[in-house]
Amino acid sequence: MDTTNLFRLDGRVALVTGGSRGIGKMIAAGFIAQGAKVYISSRKAAACEETAAQLGPNCIPLPQDVSSVAGCKALAEQFAAVEDGLDILVNNAGAAWGEPFENFPEIGWDKVMDLNVKSPFFLTQALYAPLKAAASRERPAKVINITSIDGQRLNPWETYSYHASKSALIYLTKRMAARLVQDSINVTSIAPGAFASEMNKAARDHGETIAKGIPAKRIGVDEDMAGTAIFLASRAGDYVVGDTITVDGGLVNAALGTSIDA
C-alpha cells in the first residue's frame, strides 16, 4: 500500500461554484495546492477574476449566475468550451434569508430554495456528460455539495428557508449518489459549522464569542474546510458515497445538552 499521493489531485479538473470567497475560495485554494486545475464561478465577474488572480495560473474564472436553470446550463456550456472532462464539481453557491415568521416573504423562500437546492441538482445534470467522461471505477468523478449544520440542527435565527434548503440538500445528496454511483460519479456533502465568511457574519465578526459555544472552542479555519474537501475529492475519499461529513468542531455531535433534572 502506497499512501504517498493519497490526497494529491494532480491532473484533475475541478469546478467550484461560489468560488470567489468564503468556503468556496478555501476549497479552491486547497485543490490548487494539491495539483488540480480549478475553475471558479460566481455571480460577480470582478470578484471571480480577482480571486482567480490571487490563486494563480491554475485558477480560471468562469463568472455565471447559477440561481436559474438557464444559468446552470450557461455555465456548463462555458465549461464544455474549454474542457472535455470534469473530475470534481463543488456545488457551493448559496444564499440565506432571515426574517421573523410573521413577515417572512415569498422571495426569501424562492431565492434560497432555488439557489441552495434546485441549482445543485440542475448544474450537476448540466455537467453530467463531462463528469461521466472523466469518471472510471478506478478513479470516480466527484460531486461535493456544500450543505450546513443548519440542515442538521436549529440555529437561533429565523432562517426558515435556509434550514429547509440545507436539510433538503443533505437528502438530495443521497438520492443523487444512488443514481450517479452507477456511472462512477460519487456524490457527497460537507456540512460546515462556524466559518468566517460573508454568509456567516456571526463567525466572521464575533468569532471569539461564537467559539465559546463550540466544543472545540474555536471557529473553523481554511485548512479545516480545505482538508475535508481534498479528502472527498482525492483517492482518499473514493469509497465515500452519499454521506455528509460534518465539519463544525463538535457542535452537532459532541455538544452537551442542558440537564432538566431538578
Image (tube, rainbow, N blue to C red):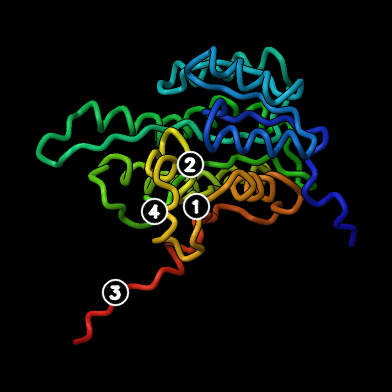
Mark 4 — residue?
209
Q: Which structural element holds mark 3?
A: loop
**Residue 34 horizontal/vertical position (percent):** 77, 40
For marks 4 and 2, give the CA distance.
13 Å
| Tag 4: amino acid | Thr
Q: Which mark is residue 219?
A: 1
Mark 3 — residue?
258
Q: Which mark is residue 196?
A: 2
| Tag 3: amino acid | Thr
**Residue 23 horizontal/vertical position (percent):** 54, 38
Among the two numbered marks 4 and 2 on one chain, the one whose residue lies closer to the N terminus: 2
* Dot 4 and dot 2 residues touching (CB under 8 Å): no
Among the two numbered marks 3 and 4 on one chain, the one whose residue lies closer to the N terminus: 4
For marks 2 and 1, give the CA distance.
8 Å
Residue visible at 39% across and 61% down?
Answer: 213
Among the two numbered marks 1 and 3 on one chain, the one whose residue lies closer to the N terminus: 1
Among the two numbered marks 2 and 1 on one chain, the one whose residue lies closer to the N terminus: 2
Return the residue nearer the eye: 148 or 117: 148
